[in-house]
Amino acid sequence: MKRKLNKRKVAAAVKQRDTKQLELLMNNWQSPEIADFIYHLPPADKAFVFTILPYVMVTKTFKVLDISSQKEIIKNLPHEQAARILNEIQPDDRTQFLSELPGILVKDLLQLLSEDERIITLKQLGYPEHSVGRLMTPEYLAVHPDWTVQQVLDHIRANGKDKETINVIYVIDNEGHLLDDVRIREFLLVATDKKVEDLMDNKFNSLKVTDDEETAIEEFRKNNRVALPVIDEEGILIGIVTIDDVLRLAVDEETENIQKIGGVEALEEPYMKIPFLKLMKKRSGWLVVLFLGEMLTATAMGFFEGEIAKAVVLALFVPLIISSGGNSGSQASSLIIRAMALGEVTFRDWWNVMRREFLSGLFLGSVLGVIGFTRVTIWTLFSNIYGEHWLLVALVVGFSLVGVVLWGTLSGSMLPLILKKFGADPAVSSAPFVATLVDVTGLVIYFSIAFVIMHGTLL
Amino acid sequence: MKRKLNKRKVAAAVKQRDTKQLELLMNNWQSPEIADFIYHLPPADKAFVFTILPYVMVTKTFKVLDISSQKEIIKNLPHEQAARILNEIQPDDRTQFLSELPGILVKDLLQLLSEDERIITLKQLGYPEHSVGRLMTPEYLAVHPDWTVQQVLDHIRANGKDKETINVIYVIDNEGHLLDDVRIREFLLVATDKKVEDLMDNKFNSLKVTDDEETAIEEFRKNNRVALPVIDEEGILIGIVTIDDVLRLAVDEETENIQKIGGVEALEEPYMKIPFLKLMKKRSGWLVVLFLGEMLTATAMGFFEGEIAKAVVLALFVPLIISSGGNSGSQASSLIIRAMALGEVTFRDWWNVMRREFLSGLFLGSVLGVIGFTRVTIWTLFSNIYGEHWLLVALVVGFSLVGVVLWGTLSGSMLPLILKKFGADPAVSSAPFVATLVDVTGLVIYFSIAFVIMHGTLL
């Protein structure tokens, strides 16, 4: 409650540009709180808040802001203050920020950097987008095998200040080759006259500078580390990647996956902030593609127009039949996409998956088929809607459900595996995509079964 | 290549129970590698590998295994060795493991623990499932404000060995109230005669023992920390939660979300390992619910049977119309679900979301409507399939698409917000769920528009 009151006062102080009051009120705020608060302010107010933040909070807060807020602040700050922020933030955060901006703006902003920082940044921007090179920071601590623990601790005290993490210390040889990574705890738990080499086990996991972001996320998931070293082709240590940056990436990746599964291109901006026309562009693309695919259903239905005219009752079950295929397909595809993302299923398992899904499809199809059959039978007891051939209708509905659900599970499960095999992202085989694919074939299955069962009576 | 050859040799050694060879071959393997390898072995072989692992690797590897492998190992090991593992692993990992087992088995396994460990474990099992109390470990380091940095470092050296992390040191008063958390780097970067209180800023984030897992994940995302302290109602420090456990939870949560969006109950076991009948149970539940909902389409279509008999051409576009509603609904719901999960959208934004989705629906509906209208027009140039009233058909299709897509986006976006408001999980409003909902209303919209436009001619 008090917090809330406080927030209202802060908002008022921002509006009135009351620097003194604002400094007083925000005195004990931490960076996530400040970021949350700033998020909802108009651009000029955002920049104003940044001008009154204490030195140390500026870089901390800038780092946790979303990219559009970051842009607004840099654009709205006086040159000098923008320069201070850009020079002070960690190289990896800076590179991430600059990567998101249009080239012309980057050129301007690079002019604001000191020469040292500019060199680091230009080098990082030289690595491919979404590569580990863009993520890493050169701010790590390295020691040599022949040092004593005391020497290491002295080195940390002298040089650790502006390092991104000192939780892991890297051991290198004289040429800079990475030999080992040693957690700080190892140094703190032994006598200070021990040598670094006594603590080494020569086992370490590292990233290559050209690895992509997904590899980095994967490595962090497997190895319970707060930072991983980055080496070049010759094994020379050139930087580290810290877990906070990877966590942020993992959240973005999850968003992208969920949006893809829902049949939207990745938005890359918060839903409430993305400009309307951009949102429409991201959404209409897939929607039109799906619509064009779905138009085949009209074509397919056209082929069966004669049958429908003879037995209108068939048309009544079209939505039920095709949606059951679509639903079972969505289930199967989301299960397999996720299992692939977790490494539980790879292309080599396709046969096992297929067997499993064949049985699943038969089972689930039979369950729905029996319900469908029963539905038609029960309705017939109360009305004459399905006519004298109601039993044939019930049989067609029942068998079609088995066929369509079987087909749905098989397509839904195989499609992600096939996409992956051909280098595409399995998440593209989203629920709507699978549903569309299954709809057209579902109609063909339905009317074929109807033809076989009703031939000579209704058809 | 070499690695692969090695793996084949290891597999052979496991089959032959060749202890010596196996120890030699696995000598420099790390725990994630071992876990990966074990994952594919039958239960007895899994347990065998565990008997030959060096002491330190046993607990490290057990921790990163999936729950079903863990179970298989504990079940297949001799009592004595199972006891050793259970006593050695960190309390939080042990509690997580025991939480997943049936009560009767837990009782047996508790007997294997030493008294100290049993007390800790029973206490943790007393906290509600999925609460922070189950996640935390009592293995942290605490110091007092009047200590010098040298005293702290000595304390770490003497007591840090079996602590889960020493990256963060906690400052408590004499009653055990948490006063501050100080990162290890603060101690390492200052002169050793400084006092702890000189390093304190009295700002810290903490979890409550009764908080749920989602809160913990959220806090770790916001605060860039490797561990967070856990306090009771009186503010007394009773444990810490480390980031590795939270990361694992976050992956599980993501899996659950993706499965829900695909219309499956959360599996809780890897796809390839879950028993077939259990898999069917998880899948058939939702599928049957959706099917029962979708049966309303047959009822709705029944109402329009007369119209269809008069204008069979109407039936041809039924799949196209309803799937367009479903697809636009899936898009909207997955966007909103994700934005809610990230905290970008809350219930209070419902009006803004609705306005945005109303415009989106009109826009996207018009795009599809124009394509649909054009489709009918062009087909008419080449065939007579739509009859003399083709223009009416084209108009019905075009306007229905606008109506259905608008309805789809509105339902898809509002449903997650409404579910959340009533305390349900928004992810339940999955693509298949929204599609089913929209299908029935889509039919009503379609046939109503048809009735208005075609009244007096075809109908």
Image (spheres, coloured by chain):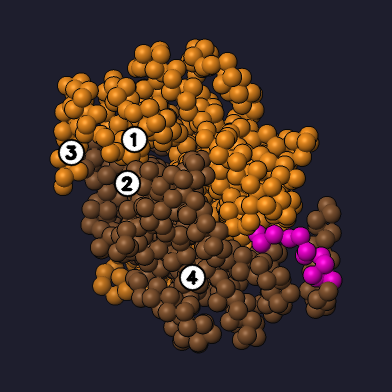
Chain colours: A orange, B brown
Q: Residue at x 65, y 70 (%)?
A: B58
- Mark 4 — on which chain does it sit? B
Q: Which of B447 and A159 is in front in this view?
A: A159
Label 1 belongs to which residue?
A: A35
Q: Mark 3 lies on which chain?
A: A
Which is closer to the viewer, label 3 or label 1?
3
Of the numbered discs 3 and 1, the one sitting upstream in the chain is 3
* Amino acid at dot 3: Asn
**Are circles 3 and 1 on residues that touch, CB within 8 Å?**
no
Spot occupied by residue B4 in the image (x, y as percentages of width and height) = 80, 57
- Residue type marked 1: Ala
Q: Are marks 4 and 3 in contact (CB under 8 Å)?
A: no
In the rendered view, does B214 fall on the left or right side of A224?
Answer: left
How far apart marks 3 and 1 lie (CA) works out to: 16 Å
Other-residue count near label 2 (Cα within 10 Å), few / some / many at <14 / 14–19 / ≥20: few
Q: In which quarter of the image is the C terminus of chain B?
A: top left
Q: Is B416 placed above or below A364 here?
A: above
Asked if the residue under mark 1 is in contact with the one under mark 4, i.e. CB atoms within 8 Å, the reply is: no
Sequence-wise, which precedes: disc 4 or disc 2?
4
Q: What element carries label 3?
A: helix
- Taking depth in this image into account, of B231 and B53 the one nearest to the observer is B231
Q: Residues within 10 Å of mark 1 (few under 14, many from 20)?
A: many
The residue at which mark 3 appears reads as A6
Residue B422, above or below A144: below
Please determine if labels 3 and 1 lie on a single subunit: yes
